[in-house]
Structures are given as C-alpha cells and as structure tokens.
Amino acid sequence: MRTDHSDGVHSVVRLTLWNIITSPLGIPKYVQGNYQLYLPFSTDADGPLGWSALCRAADSLVKEQSQRIEQYYQSLGNTTIQGTSLPVAGTHTLCFDRENDLLVNCAEFIRICDPDIITGYNIQNFDFPYILKRASTLKVLRFPFLDLETKAKDSRFSSKALGIRGNKAINIEGRLQVDVLKIMQRDHKLRSYTLNSVSAHFLGEQKEDIHHSIIADLQNGNDETRRRLAIYCLKDAYLPQRLLDKLMCIINYIEMARVTGVPFNYLLTRGQQIKVISQLYRKAKQQGLLIPNMNPEDIFLKTSVQKGMLPIILEDLIGARKKAKADLKKETDPFKRAVLDGRQLALKVCDCVSYVIIKGTKDAVAYEKAEDPLYVLDMNIPIDTKYYLENQLANPLMCIFKPILGVKLSSLLARDHVRTISVAAPTSMRGLMKFAVRTATCLGCRTPLPKDETAVCINCRPKMVDLYQKHLNNMTQLEEKYSRLWTQCQRCQGSLHQDVLCSAQDCPLFYMRKKAQKDLNDASKTMNRFAYEW
C-alpha cells in the first residue's frame, strides 16, 4: 500500500501474506461468501516466482567459498548467464562477464517482480544459502536486500512423524518461500525425492539430469553448450511450479492455514502440535477463556455443565467440512471447485541415494553390502538374490495370494519354478577373483582354448559360420535396442542432434541404457574374436 504526499514523501506499508490468509475470527467467517476467494495461482507472470541456481567449483580450488556461480535463471521468462549463450525460446537471455553484475541483476529482477511467493526445489537448503554466501564473498552489498536484509541461519526440526532434520532458515520479509522438496517429504512417501523422480511420478515426464562433473566443461565450451545448461536450469525452475499446480499445493496449504489459524510458513517448518494449540487459543479467545497449565486429573466437567473446547472444535470442523462438500457438489467453476476440495481435505486432515544389495558374508548387515548400481553393473558383481526375493517379492506376493491360496500359500515360492537363479560371472578383482586366471573358451562348446585360437576349438570349426551368424544377429538386436533407448533419452532432453549427458539414477531408462551399452560392448568384443581371414 503506497501513499503519496504533497511534500514528496512516500510512505510504504507492506502486509505480509500470512496475515491475509489466516483469519483470526476462525472458521465461520471464511466458509461463505467472498472470504473464500483469492487470486488464482499459476505458472504465468502473475504466479509464484520459481528459480534455480547452477554452479561449479573452480578447477584449482576445492573450498566452497571459492566456488563461482555459472548460471542463475528465473522461470518468469528471464535468464541471466555469466558468459555468452545462444538465445533460449520463450525467455529473455541476459549475459554478463562479471559474477558481481550477474548477482546485482538477479536481485534487482526479484525486487522489480515483487513476488509474493518464491518457489523452487531445495532452494531453502542450497540455492538461497549458496547465493547469499557468494554475494557476501564478492561483497555485493545490495544483493541480500530482496526486501529487508536476507540472512541464512541454521535451524533444527524434530518430530516423531518426520524425525530430526537440519534446515536453513531464510528470512525474506513479505515473501513466502515454498520449497517443493519440503512439501514432497512431508506429504508423500516416495522411494526417491529427487526432482527427476518426483516429476516422473506425478507429472509423467522427466528432465535431462546433467552430472555436476561435466558442468565446468559445458560452461567453458561454446554458446551452444551454455544454452544447454540454460535449458537444464530452466527445467529445474519450471518443474516445481508444475508440481505446485498439479498437486494444488498452494491452495491446499492456504486452506490448511485458514482452518488451523497458523501462518503459512509454519505448515512447512513446524509440526502438528502448533496447529492444535492455535485452534485451542482461537476458540478460547472467542469464548473469553484462558488456557491454564493444569494437570488433567485436577478437574473434569461433564457436557451437561459445560462442553469442552476440543469437542466444540471437532464439531466445527465436521460441520465446516460437510458444508464444503455440499458447496463442492453445487459449484461449476473449476478453480472454485479446487478451492473447496482443498478446504474439505484440510478440514479432514487438519536426500536418497540409489544402491543395491550385493552378496556378502552371512552375518553382514545390509549397509555393509550396499553398493553403487553402476559399479555393480560394470563389474558384474552378484546381487543378494535372497534379500530381494524375500524382502521385495515374497512379502507382497504373500499378501496378494493369501485370500486365494489359503493354506497352500507356502507352496507358492517353494517349487521348482523358483529354483533357477542366473548369476553372471563377476569381473571385478575383489575377493577370490584376485587369484582367478581368465581363460578364453570356445564359443560353441565352452572348452578352454589354446593360445593360438580365439573363437572356436578344432571340433567346432565346422560350425563356425553358424556361430558367427548367431552372434551377429545378437549384436544387431543389441544395437537396435541401444539406439532406441538413446533416441528416447534424446527426446527427453529436447534435442535429437546432441549427445546424451543425462545421469539421472532415478530413471529406469538410465540403467536400461547403461545395461544395453555394456551388453553391446561385450557382443562387439565377442565378434572381434572371429578375426579369421576367410
């Protein structure tokens, strides 16, 4: 709110968003009429501001303070880059030679847009603290003043439901920070919480995940490689907004804040107790009561004397939900229906690392047998089949077939059809493999070959043409499979003319492509053994 005076003095009053969202009068005021309305949120220029930062460490320095920001992008059609870059469709690209100018421009962009909501993925624990630290290191004094002076402080959150977590508390007065990673961790139980995995789960689409080790090469390349980084970082800023729209997170959290009477940011940084206490204080204020700190056995009143506040709150919640569901059936406007659905749900509810378990000693615990999937794939290390059969397959299958098989359930996994397990020979030089000597064998009868033979033994020489054709057909099939997977990954990254750099270990296509590539290399080595002069 701005007021102009004749003497040239301007007074500015800023109302924080949670003061508008949270009604101090309780539920009855906002469940009807214009109290339930607010501006729609979307991914256009009037919606939340999504952003992401991309950086790399200097080649000769390791300390975090020496790291340099390479890209910094806004999802409102604005892109700022250190260095030159080709233009990106649908965005305004701004290029800077100095990192100081880049930071100043980005801070000015936020102040001009003046967003009420800033969103992104893991911006609370990485993007904001890192950018603020870089601005402090480079002595860019104007950058932290995104509203009032912004600072990052360490905080610690503990609850029985979510456990103990360390966070960064970022104060940006007048602007809500909606970290989509926090929402996913609080509201959804997923196998992985990376942006690629979450987007595949809810949106059915993925992004090219560039490994941090090649960011420096792309930045130091040409304008085309820097444009590729720009597209990658724009995806990081755009997908969180898509998730907010898809899951109606903003609407649902606003309705939860209205129902419980707590500030919006408390829903992401606090636990469940604050919601209950807030409702108790609000109801006590309406009835002109104070909440004393008494032992529960000191006094008890029956309903005939005076109804307790908790039953009154529960009745209000149930009544408000019934009204919201009745209004939901009558409403035809899609946005108002989403608001009412978020309200009735609010009234109703009032970092993963990929690994596989490999074979180990009998008494070894699970974390000692955990290994990187790519390393296991490259070295043909045998996985612990018993662990996966019993923990990943047996228990779910037992639950499914118990009503059907009854007492015969034990025979489901105890017959001949489950006794065959295929294990590839390990290629890693660990354990007893350190003392093993590799010997080439015949491709026909598997007989060890003498040193002067490379493909088949003397007895299998007449069948060499058939064996050659067999392995050639196998190699052709593997080439076709690998090319199809490669093309599918190119479509995901948005270009059919560039190499695939994606290293998203949450994507099943990533391991399928790596496995097909390894099988194709093995088939190529096998074909090279037919080095005869015909």
Image (tube, rainbow, N blue to C red):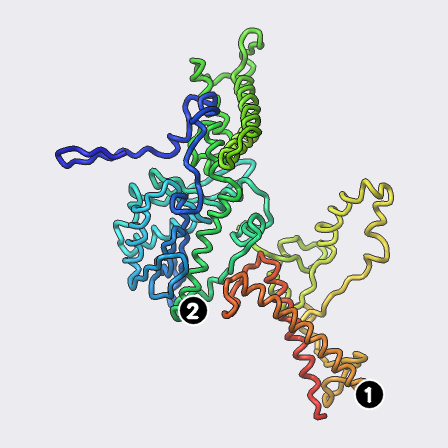
Location of residue 522 with respect to 352 vertically, above or below: below
Residue at left 28%, top 58%? 101
Helix, strand or loop at mark 1: helix
Helix, strand or loop at mark 2: helix
Residue marked by disc 2: 217
Label 1 amino acid?
Answer: Pro
Which one is nearer the viewer's eye here, 109 or 295? 109
Location of residue 432 with respect to 459 vertically, above or below: above
Q: Is residue 67 visible?
A: no
Residue 248 x/y as whole percent: 51, 40
Relative side of 329 to 439, left or right: left
Which one is nearer the viewer's eye here, 407 or 154? 407
Residue 529 x/y as whole percent: 69, 84
Quarter-wise, where is residue 508 in the image? Answer: bottom right
Residue 171 x/y as whole percent: 36, 41
Label 2 amino acid?
Answer: Asp
- Mark toward the start of the polypeptide (1 vs 2): 2
Check residue 462 in the rendering and tell me which mark sits there, or answer none. 1
Quarter-wise, where is residue 300 in the image? Answer: top right
Residue at left 46%, top 49%? 121
